[in-house]
Amino acid sequence: MAKKKELKKHSSAIHTNGKLSLLERKLSNVLLYNAYDDLLTQRVHSINIYALAEVSGFNSHNVEVLKDAIRNLASVKIEWDIRNEDGSTKWGISTLLSSVEIEKGVCSYEYSRALSEKFASPELYGIINLEIQKTFTSSYTLTIYEICSRYKGILRNRETAYTPWYSLEEFKKFLGIEDSEYYSIFKELNRKIIKPSVSEISGSLKKYIGTDIVIVPEFKRIGRTVADIRFKITSNKQIPLALENREYEAIRKTEHYSQLVEFGMSDKGAIHVIKTTEPEQLTRNIEATQQAVQAGSIASSVTGFLSQAIKDDYKPKVTKTEKQKEEEKRKKQLALEQKAKEAQQAELEKQRKATSKLIRSEYIQALSEDVQANLLEKLKEDKPQAIKKLIKSLESPQIASELDAMIPGFEEELDSRLEA
């Protein structure tokens, strides 16, 4: 992906319901970005699974987690009602992904014909910066950023842009919380979703770097009740530079950067090469150049040889003994990494279970005894008789997952506590 990582995203996707996790929403944007130029000419698109994780900001090699997220994307039904500038609408429905396969580290996937045509020729679109979306910590924040991104193009000619007015019911549907009793109370919606998302997008708190826009929510009231919401949008001219600087500083700390500069490549050239070349290839090309230097076979510029090595993907010469040693070393390293990952996953799972239990306990304690009793009976009613006998209270593990699904904002609260 050498091109600038900005995705023109179809308004139907932006205005679909928000029942996707943060990782799922990020993955869907990266998959679309990867396929965008070939939507009308290719049926199947592919991307390296680890590149997909990296661009999505998923800092792990746990492929099973990615598979779960992609599995959910393949089952999500997208219902859209495109809002045209003249006020007319176009309704449709499709699954987000029609098929997905992962083989030998490559994810191959397809969109339905209807979605491919709409994504390839968007009547209305928002521009989603994939570097910026990496920084988001909430799926609600990313959804609101997507909504506002559709209108930031207006800022080329004006200092201020606005989204349309949305009813609160419409807005909650975008976020996927239209059925939540908890968020039917505007005070909670504002406290838990709107205010944190605005802070994260605008960078108004020190813990958030912000994005390329600053947004301010505006409300319409009927009497004392908030009925509608829109967002005022202005450019945040300093943030893209901050994001770029942060990315460049990280690149300058890499071994590849040091090696390229040692061979005479400029700072700008080294950064460009690292951003546009797969790490495995770059390692090969640098090793090939090092061998050529040691053999004294470079007749002209070392920097020129290195540039050609990268362009034509020169490979180093490896003896049979070196291959065997490298393979043994690789296997040992993989075994160590796997063991460390398993230990880390076990610890994270332990923390997740303990924190989930605490959230459930707090929720249960806030309910009256009558409500607890009624809820317990409801959760038991579809269980086999043998399981019913094991369920003694709302704390019973046999009904934990069902109870979690009923707790408003459970996943967001769990993620928040685990990150704290």
Image: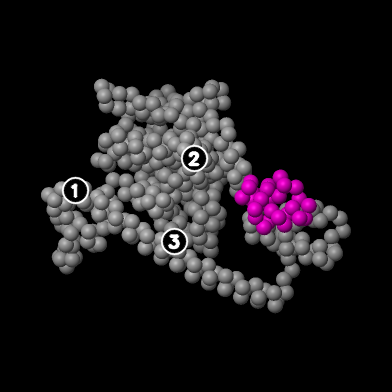
> Residue at 37% across / 63% down in the picture?
350
Quarter-of-image position of residue 390: bottom left
**365 or 18, nearer to the observer:** 365
Distance of label 1 from label 2 (alpha carbons): 36 Å
**Residue carrying label 3:** 64
> Residue at 60% across / 71% down in the picture?
330
Distance of label 3 from label 2 (alpha carbons): 34 Å
**Residue carrying label 1:** 367
> Residue at 47% across / 47% down in the picture?
26
Q: Amino acid at mark 1?
A: Leu
- Residues shaded magenta: 248-276
**Residue carrying label 2:** 206
Element at badge 3? Answer: helix
Q: Is residue 113 above or below residue 215?
A: below
Q: Mark 1, mark 3: which one is toward the viewer?
A: 1
Q: Is residue 37 magenta?
A: no
Label 1: few (<14), some (14–19) or many (≥20) C-alpha neighbours in 10 Å: few
> Residue at 72% across / 57% down in the picture?
259
Q: Is residue 257 magenta?
A: yes
Q: Amino acid at mark 3?
A: Glu
Q: Residue 68's spot in the image, x, y percent?
A: 41, 57
